[in-house]
Image (cartoon, rainbow, N blue to C red):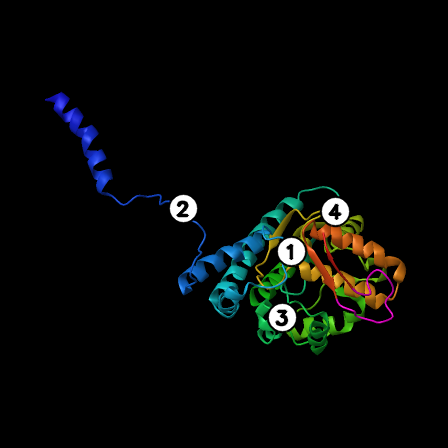
Amino acid sequence: MRRLQFLLLLVLPLLAAADAEPVLRTVTDAPGGVASDSSDELYCDGWRLSVETGNAGPWRAIPSRCLGFVRAYMEGERYASDSAVAAADSLAFAEQALALASREVGGARPAWVFDIDETLLSNAPYYAVNGWGSQEFNETSFDEWVDVAEAPALPSSLKLYKELQGLGIHIILLTGRSEFQRNVTQVNLSFAGYHSWEKLILRQSPDIGKTAVQYKSERRAALEAEGFKILGNSGDQWSDLLGLPMATRSFKLPNPMWSAAADVKRLVLLALDSKRSEEHLGVFLAIVLLQGPGARREFDNRSAATPWPLRSFNLVM
């Protein structure tokens, strides 16, 4: 009898498992073949993940099949929700890190570094009339939008900003914008509700031609040399966060509209506008290294007076 009971104990779970739905399903190939709404949504959700994690590398524009997906993401609840989760995680860490920092000897001033565009300020009104990132980035039209100085705050970032100030953390704004945009940037920040920051750091003339990683890393090093301890760093691009020294912890905000390729083109246009021809070759080589082999490089003829090598070329490596 005991032997029969023992066998039943072994067999019954196997019979139940045979009738149950499998817990793990077979992973299918990426959506392909005839496009449909469901396959596009799956593909575009995966594409967005690849962009946010940096797996996609430099890219020029949103895939045409993903325009509706990105528009729905940016205009709907998901973008706001994703941003709010990042802000909540940031605040939770800040409270813990501040408590630990208070026990350290040395008196370093606790600081938090914020990027500006798509981190503190939302340029959604600009992108809404410019294809939500489906068009190649246009430096001229974007600068015209910046001059309007009416970009709204990202609500979750404004909330975090004020909460960090309430904790006594020094706020540092570190942006890829140029010094000539300081006034309109200050006006826009105030318009959006941001006040009482410790520093507003913009690109200076010596920063022209530097990658975002190099430029922002150098500025973080300078802040540490001034006696700041950078507890946190918030940005929508990995180039806002990477490079030494890094913050104690970095927080990547969502942004499926902007690519590293736009940062590359910004480097070139800054160099062209500077009219400092001795820097052009250095900028060109930096672009080649940043984008890597196989990338196609195209730059417009910004000025007929622009000297070699950036006057006009189309290079494939």
Q: Are marks 3 and 2 in contact (CB under 8 Å)?
A: no
| Residue occupied by mark 4 | 107
Q: Residue 271, percent across and down?
A: 82, 63
Indicate the amino acid at tag 2.
Answer: Val
Between discs 1 and 3, the one toward the N terminus: 1
Query: What residue appears at the point 66 percent right and 76 percent down from the top-left corner?
Result: 150
| Magenta part of the chain | 300-312
Q: Are marks 3 and 4 in contact (CB under 8 Å)?
A: no
Q: Main secondary structure of the magenta part?
A: loop
Q: In front here: 220 or 238? A: 238
Q: Residue 291, percent across and down?
A: 70, 53
Q: Is residue 257 left or right of residue 181?
A: left
Between discs 1 and 2, the one toward the N terminus: 2
- Front tag of 4 and 1: 1
Between discs 4 and 1, the one toward the N terminus: 1
Q: Is residue 304 above or below residue 267?
A: below
Q: In front here: 5 or 302? A: 302
Residue 214 numbered tag: none
Compute the Cα span from label 3 to label 2.
37 Å
Residue 123 numbered tag: 3
Residue 58 numbered tag: 1
Between discs 3 and 2, the one toward the N terminus: 2
Q: Is residue 174 visible?
A: no
Query: Dot 3: within a 10 Å radius of its alpha carbon, few (fewer than 14), some, or many (20 or more) residues?
Result: some
- Front tag of 3 and 4: 3
